[in-house]
Amino acid sequence: MSEYNFKGIQADSIQLLCENRFNDSKSFYEEHKEELKQGITVPMRQIMLDLSDLMIDIDDMMLTDPVKSVCRIYRDTRGNRNKIKYRENMWMFFRRYKNEFPGAPFYFFEFFPDSFGYGLVFWLYRPALFKEVHRMILGHPDRWLDAVKACEEAGFTYDCRDEYKKELYPDAPEELKPYLRAKNMSFCYYSKDLSRISTPALIDELKLAFDIARPMYEFFIDAYENLMNEGLIKPEDYYRR
């Protein structure tokens, strides 16, 4: 294990984050702001610093700014039914700059009071656009299945939040059909063992998994770039919604 900036996210820091969320009080937050910063925000940003070389190698347009990549403890509740101002879970995205590449596939890392996870996700705000992934799966089935296998070797499990109820491609090979119903996709790993995020070994774990899953990211980004090249994804349209 190399020398990393990240030294771990400790149990007492997670406990304080939960207490901050429970109190949901600006005065409590301000009293413990520096502790939360050093125990939660700084380590999360250090993860990005330690993974930045790998992420740029995977995609040279990947945003590696640690400040912009990590969510804030303080939630923006404007327009949100949930008015709780503070988080008890934290996440970070490894992706292209969203203002220029809205909806681009991304890697992520997150933790909750009782678990943590990481993986690779491709969601699009218009589900019909995801049919470009279907088209590529049908056009390059071997490449797709190799990418799925790579995700399995990385320890990731396939999931889909929304599917078409109707079979869109009844003549497709059976091994492809589960993916051809998807309106979005994720390949993720989760664990209840929070002790594993308390040491720098987490960086080695993330590096290995993200690198092994690289074929799936490349497949997704090719589909995404096809959509952009065809003018089906335009940043100005996305932020006009």
Image (cartoon, rainbow, N blue to C red):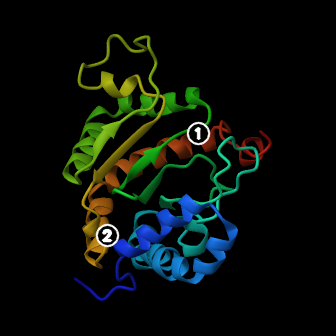
Can the viewer see residue 65?
Answer: no
Q: Quadrant of residue 206?
A: bottom left
Q: Residue furthest right?
A: 240
Q: Please, what secondary structure does the residue beneath circle 1 have?
A: helix
Q: Amino acid at mark 2?
A: Ile
Can the viewer see residue 103?
Answer: yes
Quadrant location, the C terminus: top right
The residue under the point 24% across, 19% down is 174
Q: Which residue is mark 1?
A: 227
Residue 187's spot in the image, x, y percent? 34, 45
Q: Amino acid at mark 1?
A: Leu
Mark 2: give few (<14), some (14-19) or many (20+) Cα within 10 Å.
Answer: many
Height in image: 150 above or below 67? above
Residue 207's spot in the image, x, y percent? 31, 68
The foreground one among 98 and 57 is 98
Q: Is residue 25 left or right of residue 173?
A: right
Who comes first in sequence, dot 2 or dot 1?
2
Q: Which residue is mark 2?
A: 197
Height in image: 178 above or below 80? above
3D distance between C-alphas at marks 2 and 1: 37 Å
